[in-house]
Image (cartoon, rainbow, N blue to C red):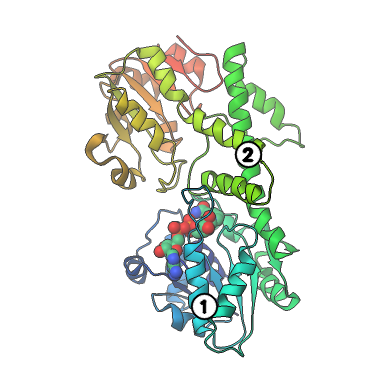
Amino acid sequence: MKKITVIGTGYVGLVSGTSFADIGNEVICCDIDSNKIEKLKQGFIPIYEPGLEEVVKKNTQLGRLSFTTDIPGAIRSSDIIYIAVGTPMSVTGAADLRFVTEAAKTIGQHLNDYKVVVNKSTVPVGTGKLVQRMIQSHLSNPHVTFDVVSNPEFLREGSALKDCMNMERAVIGATSEKAASIIAELHKPFNTEIVITTLESAEMIKYASNAFLATKISFINAVANICERVGADVTEVSRGMGLDSRIGSRFLNAGIGYGGSCFPKDTHALVHIAESAGYDFHLMKSVIRTNDQQRLVVVDKVKEVLGSLRGRTIAVLGLAFKPNTDDMRDAPSLQIIPALLREGAKIKAYDPIAAKEAVVHFGDQIEYVEEPYDTILNADAALILTEWEQVVSMDPKQMRKLMNMPVVIDGRNIFSPKTMQENGFIYHSIGRPPIH
Ligand code: NAD
């Protein structure tokens, strides 16, 4: 059993802290956001993440998981300190490290004996060493020793707890063997592949992994755009490609591009890391440009069918960047909806979970509807942006009866073109022949 402090109780800190508690450790999750900590103390989970509430509750009741804003106290009482604060994109595209350095400073000031400081935030190569220097230069007790480890996180929002509990690998980058073995030992109950590397390699593994997945998405989207022009069907193409084990079928679904709090910022950050190291990563720049353009493909498609959008009612089904999350950070809807509004369209939007978050972005510029069928009632077109189960399970026959015009633009390829044709729809999807 280890005593662990996790600094930053967001998607990653809360989920990984809960996972460490669930395998028997004593974990204190801390945050500077007192609202968040207060809610957690009262048993309320500030983010939407399936299955998390019960496991948080169980471990809190067992006394293995607690929440505090007293970060100094938590630091002093732990053996291992995880940094899991945000590393958002700055205006230059580089990762903004201000929360990481602030956390490192606090750790230095309150370090009372040997501890392993672990960086779980996604950070540019070299940050481990920077954290080491920051802690060293803020030590109030100069005799105390510590080690810094990089242990990046690979969980996906929407299945974060499951991903953490069943991690496919634990990457542990360290300069000290002692620290690496402490963190490897901590991961033993997860029964996973342990990859021990240098600090720099661990930091790079995280960016390279996200950048590779983003590349796969932009690649299949570019292929989809070609398919549309040559009369091929991208779903057949990706199935045919994905059966090749060298390629694999995952992340080969054409759509409106990637979004969320990680891929957009991490791809930009990697371009920036490369640039700082004197390498022009033009491949990644193209991946980003392809993704930016892909988001607006659905707007072009709806204009192609309806002509002017002025005064038209468009039903937007799904606002989050993917199902099972309330995270609206860099969701494609944040570009698509303003583009529709600029064209003069009236928007009725549905999202079972993220609508609350969307209000922050769109205010009363759009109408929020609580039920998918009510959203399409009297609409001139429906745009599918997120493949929520509530949307995937909609019945085209019933949809047809409710809509003013039978126009569906499917940004996630959730419906069968044949079914849509049988129900009399004008149906455009991504990379598949349109139904007129
Ligand atoms: P988040 O914004 O949800 O949470 C970060 C938390 O850190 C916030 O609650 C904030 O109040 C807190 N914080 C900031 N400064 C602090 C400080 N000095 N002391 C204490 N708390 C502080 O972020 P997130 O989505 O959990 O991401 C955290 C890191 O993990 C990022 O680097 C991200 O790139 C990486 N990551 C995220 C995901 C994901 O799916 N969200 C997956 C893998 C890796």
For mark 1, give the secondary structure.
Answer: helix
Task: Between residue 245 and residue 259, name the one nearer to us.
Answer: 259
* Mark 2 crowdedness (10 Å alpha carbons): few <14, some 14-19, many ≥20: many
Give the camera-side residue of 253 and 103.
Answer: 103
Residue 255 visible from this viewpoint: yes
Circle 2: element type: helix
Q: Quadrant of residue 202?
A: bottom right
Residue 9 in view here: no
Vertically, is 44 above or below 293?
below
Q: Does the residue labelled 2 lie within 8 Å of ligand 1?
A: no
Q: Where is residue 66 in the image (x, y as percent from the top left)?
A: 43, 75
- The residue positioned 39% from the left and 13% from the top of the image is 305
x, y percent for residue 220: 62, 29
Amino acid type of disc 1? Ile
Residue 107's disc number:
1
Residue behind mark 2: 284
Q: In this view, does 76 lie above or below 248?
A: below
Residue positioned 58% across, 32% down in the render: 253
Percent position of residue 67, x then y: 41, 74
